[in-house]
């Protein structure tokens, strides 16, 4: 895969994470959610990105073994 395509995928993942984090922060500022719920949503967001990152890394590692 080209380095340019890798950078585009990395930028897309980083921007989507930042967008969701900003959205959660805006919900907190607009008093739609409480502080506790906002923190829980942020922790869940980080967990999802880390979890799927591990799954993708394991999938790529296993596909190289075959």
Image: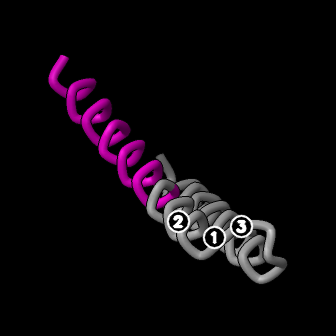
Q: Tell me residue 38's x, y (percent).
A: 60, 68
Q: Tell me residue 56's x, y (percent).
A: 37, 38
Asked whether the beta carbons under mark 3 and mark 2 sit within 8 Å of each other, the answer is: no
Residue, disc 1: 21
Magenta span: 45-66
Asked whether the beta carbons under mark 1 and mark 2 sit within 8 Å of each other, the answer is: yes
Sequence order check, earlier mark of 3 and 2? 3
Residue, disc 2: 42
Q: Tell me residue 24's x, y (percent).
A: 69, 68
Q: Tell me residue 19's x, y (percent).
A: 71, 68
Relative horizontal placement of residue 17, taking residue 66 as reference (left or right): right
Q: Nearer the viewer, residue 7 or 40?
A: 40
Relative horizontal placement of residue 57, taking residue 35 as reference (left or right): left
Residue at image location 65% in from the left, 71% down from the top = 34
Secondary structure that dominates the magenta span: helix
Residue at image location 80% in from the left, 68% down from the top = 32
Secondary element type, mark 3: loop
Secondary element type, mark 2: helix
Secondary element type, mark 1: helix
Circle nearer the viewer, 3 or 2? 3
Residue 11: mark: none
Relative horizontal placement of residue 30, taking residue 20 as reference (left or right): right
Sequence order check, earlier mark of 3 and 1? 1
Q: In which quarter of the image is the C terminus?
A: top left
Q: How far apart are marks 3 and 2 (CA)?
A: 12 Å
Residue, disc 3: 33
């Amino acid at each position: 895969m080209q380095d340019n395509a890798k950078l585009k995928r990395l930028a897309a993942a980083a921007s989507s994470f930042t967008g969701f984090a900003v959205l959660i922060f805006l919900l907190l500022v607009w008093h739609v959610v409480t502080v506790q719920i906002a923190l829980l949503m942020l922790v869940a967001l980080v967990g999802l990105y880390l979890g799927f990152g591990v799954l993708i890394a394991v999938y790529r590692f296993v596909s190289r073994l075959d």
